[in-house]
Image (spheres, helix red, strand yellow):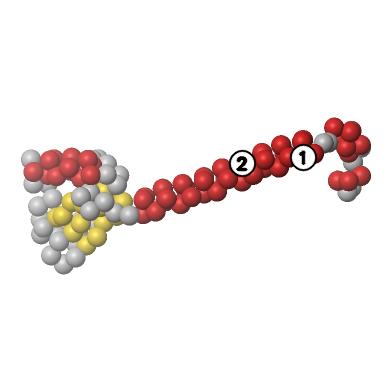
Amino acid sequence: QDANELDIMPQVDKIRTPEVDQRISDMLDRINRLRLVHEQSRRRHEEQARRDEPRAVVTLQPAPPDSMSDEILRSTFGVYGHVKRIERHPSEAFVHFERVEHARAAVAALSCSSSLAG
């Protein structure tokens, strides 16, 4: 059924005035601006989440042995905070944390332990 043919339309037409139409239009404009602000904010937060904090990286030298998988490294370092990713190179490995505090906690714990020694 067409919206213009609904039974309620005659009652709505009785209360519609230019002022009511303007208020509705203003509210819809505010809703649209809020939606745009929300989308921009969400995009900005997503970009920040994708960026690596350069100080939130633990460098492992020498690199852990190949027998120590990324999953093992992730679970080992995950105790100290959220591990975003692990990057391996022949002579070193990098554990990228979400927050600097997490990396610092891992470094403090590693300086008291040699559990990753090959």
61 lies above or below 27: below
60 lies above or below 77: below
Is 84 left, or right, of 11 in this rendering?
A: left
Under tag 1, what secondary structure?
A: helix
Spot occupied by residue 28 in the image (x, y as percentages of width and height): 67, 42
**Label at residue 58:** none
Tag 2 residue: 30
Identified at 19% across, 62% down, the residue is 66
Image-quadrant location for residue 52:
bottom left
- Distance from the alpha carbon under mark 1 to that under mark 2: 14 Å
Q: Nearer the viewer, residue 85 or 104?
A: 104
Is 10 left, or right, of 45 in this rendering?
A: right
Is 107 left, or right, of 16 in this rendering?
A: left
Q: Is residue 74 visible?
A: no
Spot occupied by residue 23 in the image (x, y as percentages of width and height): 71, 37
Under tag 2, what secondary structure?
A: helix
Spot occupied by residue 33 in the image (x, y as percentages of width and height): 58, 45
Q: How many marks overall?
A: 2
Identified at 18% across, 51% down, the residue is 58
Tag 1 residue: 21
Spot occupied by residue 83 in the image (x, y as percentages of width and height): 29, 48
Of the numbered discs 1 and 2, the one sitting upstream in the chain is 1
